[in-house]
Image (cartoon, rainbow, N blue to C red):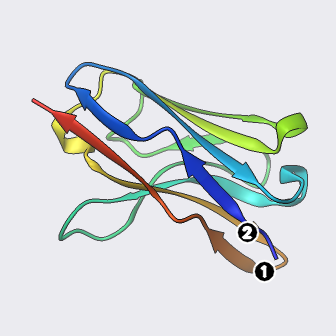
Amino acid sequence: QVRLVESGGGLVQAGGSLVLSCAASASISRIDNMGWYRQAPGKQRELVADFTTGGTANYADSVKGRFTISRDNGKNTVYLQMNSLKPGDTAVYYCKGLHRLINYWGQGTQVTVSS
């Protein structure tokens, strides 16, 4: 069993920045495809950014050039640096990881971008 806990969400003005953190209860070197998803009201959950099995960062087109995913294996934490935030980025952001064929999700953290 893996527990993922997100933090760092909040309210920010358009053009601002936030850093989200996802702390895992297990070694993230043993968790595949760790990444970030988001779900806006009335919309489906969508991929924001994740690491491929080979360790390459993968981004949704809507966030390329603005968001950066990173990881600290020593802290078992994955980060999402979000710059140039737009009102359209408003959503609940979830951390996800795959361990032993099971997808684990965090509880989510709210990001609200005001115009």
Give the amino acid type for the residue marked by disc 2 in the picture: Leu
- Inter-mark Cα distance, 1 to 2: 6 Å
Q: Is residue 7 left or right of residue 16?
A: right
Give the amino acid type for the residue marked by disc 1 in the picture: Leu
Note whether 91 is above or below 11 in the view shown. below
- Residue 82, image x, y percentages: 43, 29
Give whichever of 43, 93 is nearer the camera: 93
Dot label at residue 64: none
Where's the C terminus, which quadrant? top left
Quadrant of the image occupied by residue 86: top left
Note whether 111 is above or below 86 in the view shown. below
> Dot 2, crowdedness within 10 Å: few (<14), some or many (≥20)?
some
Q: Are marks 1 and 2 in contact (CB under 8 Å)?
A: yes
Q: Secondary structure at mark 2?
A: strand
Dot label at residue 98: 2
Where's the N terminus, which quadrant? bottom right
Q: How many marks?
A: 2
> Dot 1, crowdedness within 10 Å: few (<14), some or many (≥20)?
few
Give whichever of 65, 10 is nearer the camera: 10
Q: Secondary structure at mark 1?
A: loop
Q: Is residue 63 left or right of residue 14?
A: right
Give whichever of 12, 83 is nearer the camera: 12
- Residue 94, image x, y percentages: 50, 58
Q: Who's the residue at 76% across and 55% down the image?
A: 24
Note whether 99 is above or below 40 in the view shown. below
- Residue 57, image x, y percentages: 63, 39
Q: Who's the residue at 89% across and 50% down the image?
A: 29
Q: Who's the residue at 87% across and 59% down the image?
A: 26
Please give the residue where the numbered disc 1 appears in the rendered image.
Answer: 101
